């Protein structure tokens, strides 16, 4: 399997444990953070979507001008614009960046956040819309003659979009519900998961592959895992750092409690519910999968951590790779520092361990 590392580029330095620094759109931070991750060896960086945040597509265009190699994984919510229009945007970004664009399809998420942009469809209806949206999107990218589309959500007539992606533009898909799995099985190149214990990840991979088999895609789809590594020179130092991060996060989230806007804290989507449930069972799974931040934040987003020395965390990542995970999305609680540290101490170790594993596996097959 081809190994891939994804980082995160936000408009401002902040995290659950780190108060925002600088302006909301901090040009110097974006530049430093993007270039640091490119230098650190990340293959792509995610530009996330949220109704209260700057626009991910425009940020991606800015990052493309600041960098040369790092891929641009742009989070995108289907249903807020016509799929033909979005297809032109992504194809244009791909041309401007010389083939570095990809799309992270976000259908679910917090219903309260979706409603702030006027989307009041229920979850199953949103995924049905996404299914059709992605069909039109792909046709817009690939058709070389005018095409029509008539469906329950979209009608297109005589569309021929001249701007095309440089090559096949990868579709990364997020969503943990049964409806999400079915749409991912049909359309996704990479199915993205939040960090869960090995047993649950094994089950999820099997579930998605079984669903993909209905479309003849069980060998096509790849798997991504999102984690928040916390590293230390020793294991004790790593766990002490995790406790400091937790203390800072408690203080930060405590300050925000009176102004909390999440309507369904801890229950906004199936993925969040799964993380909250894991956190309620124990604080540490599989020796170093730490769930305290997930519990504190209601399972909001990528919030589980691997805690340990770089060698220990690399070993834990290899165990996920052996299950079928070939993409890792890593972001830290101290964003700029952690990105550099991952590039120096973690990513090279994981690459080496995977290379050794694949070499050993090839030898056994010979």
Image (cartoon, helix red, strand yellow):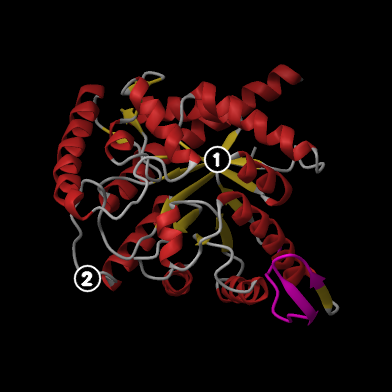
Residue at image coords 66%, 62%: 169
Give the residue number, with chain letter if any, for mark 1. Answer: 176
Q: Which mark is residue 253?
A: none
Disc 2 is placed on an element classified as loop
Tell me whether the residue at label 2 lies in contact with that at label 1, contact meaning CB atoms closer than 8 angstroms: no
Q: Indicate the quadrant where residue 49 lies.
A: bottom left
Residue at image coords 59%, 75%: 89
Q: Residues within 10 Å of mark 2 (few under 14, many from 20)?
A: few
Horizontal and vertical percent for residue 355?
Answer: 57, 32
The quarter in which the C terminus is drawn is top right
Q: Residue furthest right?
A: 145
Q: Residues within 10 Å of mark 1 (few under 14, many from 20)?
A: many
The quarter in which the N terminus is drawn is top right
What secondary structure is the stretch in magenta mostly built from?
Answer: loop
Tell whether 163 sits left or right of 317.
Answer: right
Residue at image coords 20%, 42%: 249
Horizontal and vertical percent for residue 276?
Answer: 38, 32
In magenta stretch: residue 152:
yes
- Of residue 340 and residue 81, the one placed in the foreground of this image is 81
Which of discs 2 and 1 lies nearer the camera? The answer is 1
Give the residue number, with chain letter if any, for mark 2. Answer: 23
Q: Which residues are magenta?
A: 149-168
Disc 1 is placed on an element classified as loop
In magenta stretch: residue 348:
no
Tell whether 294 sits left or right of 123.
Answer: left
Mark 2 and mark 1: span between their CA atoms?
34 Å
Count of labels in the image: 2
- Of residue 170 and residue 69, the one placed in the foreground of this image is 170
Horizontal and vertical percent for residue 308?
Answer: 31, 27
Q: State which tag comes first along the sequence, 2 or 1.
A: 2
């Amino acid at each position: 399997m081809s190994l891939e590392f994804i980082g995160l580029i936000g408009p401002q330095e902040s995290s659950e444990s780190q108060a925002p620094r600088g302006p909301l759109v901090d040009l110097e931070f974006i530049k430093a953070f993007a270039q640091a991750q490119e230098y650190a060896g990340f293959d792509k960086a995610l530009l996330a979507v949220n109704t209260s945040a700057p626009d991910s597509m425009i940020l991606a265009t800015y990052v493309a001008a600041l960098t040369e190699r790092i891929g641009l994984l742009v989070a995108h919510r289907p249903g807020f614009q016509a799929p033909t229009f979005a297809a032109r945007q992504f194809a244009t970004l791909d041309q401007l960046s010389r083939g570095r664009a990809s799309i992270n399809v976000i259908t679910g998420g917090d219903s309260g956040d979706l409603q702030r942009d006027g989307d009041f469809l229920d979850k199953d209806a949103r995924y049905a819309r996404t299914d059709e949206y992605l069909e039109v999107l792909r046709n817009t990218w690939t058709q070389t003659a005018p095409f029509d589309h008539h469906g329950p959500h979209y009608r297109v007539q005589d569309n021929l979009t001249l701007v095309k992606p440089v090559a096949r533009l990868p579709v990364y898909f997020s969503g943990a519900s049964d409806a999400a799995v079915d749409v991912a099985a049909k359309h996704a190149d990479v199915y993205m998961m939040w960090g869960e214990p090995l047993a649950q990840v094994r089950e999820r991979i099997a579930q998605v592959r079984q669903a993909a088999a209905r479309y003849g895609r069980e060998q096509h789809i790849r798997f991504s895992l999102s984690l928040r590594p916390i590293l230390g020179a020793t294991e004790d130092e790593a766990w002490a750092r995790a406790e400091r991060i937790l203390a800072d996060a408690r203080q930060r989230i405590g300050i925000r409690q009176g102004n909390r806007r999440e309507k369904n804290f801890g229950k906004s989507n199936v993925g969040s519910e799964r993380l909250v449930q894991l956190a309620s069972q124990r604080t540490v799974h599989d020796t170093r999968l730490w769930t305290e931040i997930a519990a504190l934040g209601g399972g909001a987003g990528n919030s589980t951590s691997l805690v340990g020395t770089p060698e220990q965390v690399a070993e834990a990542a290899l165990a996920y790779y052996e299950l079928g995970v070939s993409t890792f999305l890593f972001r830290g609680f101290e964003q700029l520092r952690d990105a550099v540290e991952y590039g120096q101490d973690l990513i090279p170790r994981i690459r080496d361990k995977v290379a050794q594993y694949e070499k050993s596996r090839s030898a056994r097959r010979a």
